[in-house]
Amino acid sequence: MIRGFSGTTLIDFPGRIASIVFIGGCNFRCPFCHNPELVLPDLIQKLPILTSEEVFEELQNRRGFIQGVTITGGEPLVWDSLIDFVRGIKSLGLEVKIDTNGSFPERLKKLKILVDYVAMDIKSSPSKYHLATGTDIDLDKLKESIAIVKTFRDYEFRTTVVPGFVDQEDIHEIGEIIKGAKRYVLQQFKPTKAIDPDTLSIIPYTLERLEDFRETIKDYVDEVIIRSY
């Protein structure tokens, strides 16, 4: 399930110098997904497989420099051995951040005592979720995960704002379902790679428009961040 490793990142774990572990496999098919090689089975098979032991060795060599590890994908919670893997990282004295789409609330709940930071994607408003994920969604599970995430030590909800999939009204609806959250991130869409090639022709919102979205949702959450690359 481990399909990639990056030794150092300054942007993927807020406030931490971290390494990144990439998990292959995902139950969503978001048309604008920027990691298709970690989602589509035929592309996943082209990537090398890393063992947990190999990753632990890499992390051991970086102790004293890195402070944490971000586990991303794909969708990390599709991996049955994720909890054991997280325990292994914690035994090295490192903090752990998990990126998730929020569709596995029971598995997410089991990670609460281990994980230091969780970032949950909110793909769009409930009415557009099936469009933004390319599949049918159990919205009750999504809402359950939102409630669970709010109990973690530190967390963020985040939306990649893709024109046609997320607009002003969607941001308002997102505010309603994450109301009271500590932190919400508006991520600018970057059309460089995608599952659906048609999305690569979408022109991203301007930063000024993202500021408008910030104004729309700021009363629902404690902090709103615009993340532009």
Image (cartoon, helix red, strand yellow):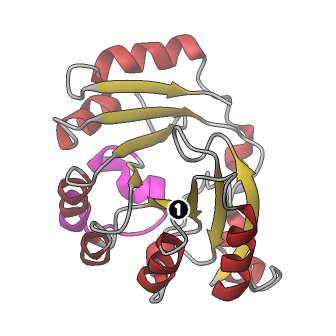
Q: Looking at the image, which residue is at 47% across and 88% down?
A: 81
> Could you tell me residue 224's position as x and y percent?
37, 25
Q: Residue furthest top?
A: 208
Note whether residue 27 is visible: no
The image quadrant of residue 158 is: top left
- Residue of label 1: 94
Determine whether, in the image, residue 150 is placed left or right of residue 226: left
The three-letter code of the residue at mark 1 reads Leu
Quarter of the image where one finds residue 146: bottom left
Q: Secondary structure at mark 1?
A: loop
Residue placed at 31% from the left, 44% from the top? 125
Task: Please name the predominant secondary structure of the magenta segment in the image.
Answer: helix
Identified at 54% across, 10% down, the residue is 208
Residue 163's place in the image compared with 140, above or below, is above
> Per the image, is 168 magenta?
no
| 88 to 222, vertically: above or below | below
Residue 186: percent from left, percent from top: 47, 31
Q: Which region shows up in magenta?
A: 124-143
Q: Furthest residue to the front?
A: 64
Q: Quadrant of the N terminus?
A: bottom right
Q: Nearer the viewer, residue 196 or 61?
A: 61
Pick the front one: 89 or 200: 89
Residue 107 image position (x, y, % from top left): 31, 77
Q: Position of residue 60 (x, y in %)?
A: 69, 71
